[in-house]
Image (cartoon, rainbow, N blue to C red):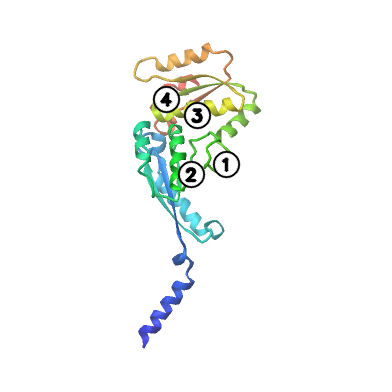
């Protein structure tokens, strides 16, 4: 008669173990992990697991759910990334990403169709209907620029889909807040003198106070930023 007692003990343990009965909430993290040094060296899976371990240990935040994360790769090309985006259905109850602003509209519509949550650090437009009401990075940047009274801003982007669309999104967001954003330049790298030409365009603009560089940091292996360091 020892076996039934043991089974009863196991059943009671399962009944009172919250981790067993907790529903799994799936998070899908979309990013260009293989496209850019800033993302490829960010160790996203390590960071995600660290965040999950903290979330799971905080009962006040976890609210009885068991959280799991899936890493999804965003293609380097915006057109290919758009095609892959439609295949991500079912990977998460909430999607974090994509990082390319060129995919924001499609991601917003797909998340609505999938009845899933969406939080994207690359989408600065506050008009997307299903993005959470968090403070956009453009608002933080605007606060800094306003404090120093830097009203005229130029933007230089690396010649990739990700950084070009990021530059355009930052420009649109800051213009909506009343700043003068001009010029918005893509720095050519296929020919010599690309950085010099970008500097010439900025210098020809009237009273530019700040240059925002949308490209990978040289500290993370960003060769484009390294070749243009003298712009600063």
Report how far apart the C-alphas of labels 1 and 2 lie in the structure: 12 Å
Disc 1 versus disc 2: nearer the observer: 2
Marks 4 & 3, CB-CB < 8 Å contact? no
Q: State the SS at label 2.
A: strand
Would you name the residue on which mark 4 appears?
158
Residue 59 in the image, given as x and y percentages of width and height:
54, 60
How much space separates mark 2 and mark 4, taking CA atoms?
27 Å
Farthest-out residue, top: 204
Which residue in the structure is indicated by mark 1?
A: 134
Q: Which mark is residue 122?
A: none
For marks 3 and 2, give the one nearer the viewer. 2
Whether pointer 1 and pointer 4 mark residues with C-beta atoms closer than 8 Å, the reply is: no
- Residue 35 seen: yes
**Circle 3: element type:** helix
Disc nearer the start of the sequence (4/3): 4
Q: CA distance from mark 4 to mark 3?
A: 14 Å
Q: Residues within 10 Å of mark 2 (few under 14, many from 20)?
A: many
Give the mark, 1 or 4, whose residue is nearer the N terminus. 1
Q: Considering depth in this image, is 203 or 104 the residue closer to the camera?
A: 104
């Amino acid at each position: 008669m020892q076996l039934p007692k043991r089974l009863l003990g196991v059943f009671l343990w399962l009944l009172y173990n919250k981790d067993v009965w907790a529903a799994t909430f799936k998070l899908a993290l979309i990013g260009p992990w293989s496209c850019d040094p800033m993302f490829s060296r960010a160790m996203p899976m390590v960071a995600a697991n660290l965040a999950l371990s903290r979330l799971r240990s905080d009962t006040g935040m976890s609210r009885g759910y068991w959280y799991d994360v899936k890493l999804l790769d965003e293609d380097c090309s915006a057109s290919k990334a758009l095609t892959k985006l439609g295949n991500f259905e079912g990977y998460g109850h909430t999607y974090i990403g994509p990082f390319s602003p060129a995919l924001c509209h499609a991601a917003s519509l797909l998340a609505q169709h999938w009845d899933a949550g969406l939080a994207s650090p690359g989408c600065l437009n506050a008009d997307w209907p299903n993005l959470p009401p968090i403070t956009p990075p453009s608002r933080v940047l605007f606060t800094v620029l306003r404090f120093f009274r830097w009203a005229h801003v130029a933007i230089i982007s690396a010649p990739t889909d990700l950084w070009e669309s990021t530059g355009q999104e930052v420009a649109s967001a800051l213009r909506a807040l009343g700043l003068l954003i001009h010029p918005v330049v893509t720095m050519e790298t296929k020919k010599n003198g690309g950085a010099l030409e970008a500097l010439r365009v900025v210098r020809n603009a009237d009273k530019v106070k700040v240059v925002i560089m949308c490209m990978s940091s040289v500290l993370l292996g960003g060769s484009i930023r390294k070749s243009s360091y003298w712009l600063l």
